[in-house]
Image: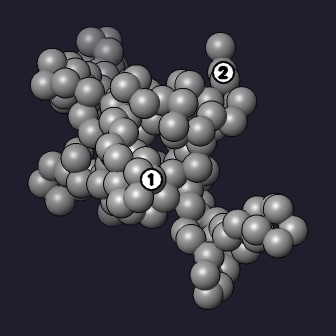
């Protein structure tokens, strides 16, 4: 069952979530005067680059820095993919008691499970009977 409700990262403090899909970036800025979020498809001064991210907990905005950190956690041989990966949110008190939310690995056990799933999924599935069928080479121009 899909959860398309919007969830704030602060609601996930201490919890694990799985990334399903990351969408193209949108630039956002809070307009305190009009009490609304301004959005732009292109970069503008004062706007922050945010990625709408579909997770198993719901849709959430993830900052450019957080996406970079998430990708860095799963980089292997120069390639990184965070789809179907699990992360844990942890809150720290920043300057002036402003909360800062970090996204980290859930646990070493989860990492091993994810890597095992990735290795298994990356292996091609070949049906045994495919080897026994003759191949027609007449349609291939040489």
Residue at x 54% of width, y 30% of height: 11
Mark 2 highlights which residue? 2
Q: Is 15 rendered above or below residue 60?
A: above
Residue 141 in sight here: no
In the image, taking residue 96 as reference, residue 74 lies left or right, namely left
Residue at x 15% of width, y 49% of height: 76
Residue 5 in sight here: yes
Determine the residue located farthest toward the right in the rendered image.
34
Task: Name the secondary structure under disc 1.
Answer: loop
Determine the residue located farthest toward the front in the rendered image.
96
* Colour approach in the figure: one colour
Instruction: Give how far across and how far down residue 106 sits, in percent.
Output: 26, 27
Query: How far, Cα to Cα, is label 2 from label 1?
Result: 32 Å
Instruction: Give how far across and how far down residue 30 sits, in percent.
Output: 70, 66
- Quadrant assignment for the N terminus: top right
Mark 1 highlights which residue? 98
Q: Mark 2 or mark 1: which is in front?
A: 1
Residue at x 35% of width, y 47% of height: 93
Residue 32, by quadrant, is bottom right
Determine the residue located farthest toward the bottom in the rendered image.
45
Instruction: Give how far across and how far down residue 65 sits, in percent.
Output: 38, 62
């Amino acid at each position: 069952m899909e959860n398309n409700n919007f969830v704030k990262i602060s609601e996930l403090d201490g919890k694990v979530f799985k990334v399903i899909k990351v969408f193209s970036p949108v630039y956002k800025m809070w307009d305190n005067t009009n009490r609304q979020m301004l959005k732009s498809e292109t970069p503008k001064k004062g706007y922050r680059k945010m990625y709408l991210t579909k997770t198993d907990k719901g849709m959430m905005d993830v900052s450019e820095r957080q996406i970079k950190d998430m990708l860095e956690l799963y980089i292997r041989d120069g390639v990184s993919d965070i789809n179907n990966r699990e992360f844990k949110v942890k809150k720290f008190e920043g300057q002036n008691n402003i909360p800062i939310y970090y996204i980290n690995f859930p646990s070493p056990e989860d990492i091993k499970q994810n890597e095992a799933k990735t290795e298994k999924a990356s292996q091609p599935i070949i049906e045994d009977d495919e080897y026994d069928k003759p191949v027609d080479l007449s349609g291939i121009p040489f």
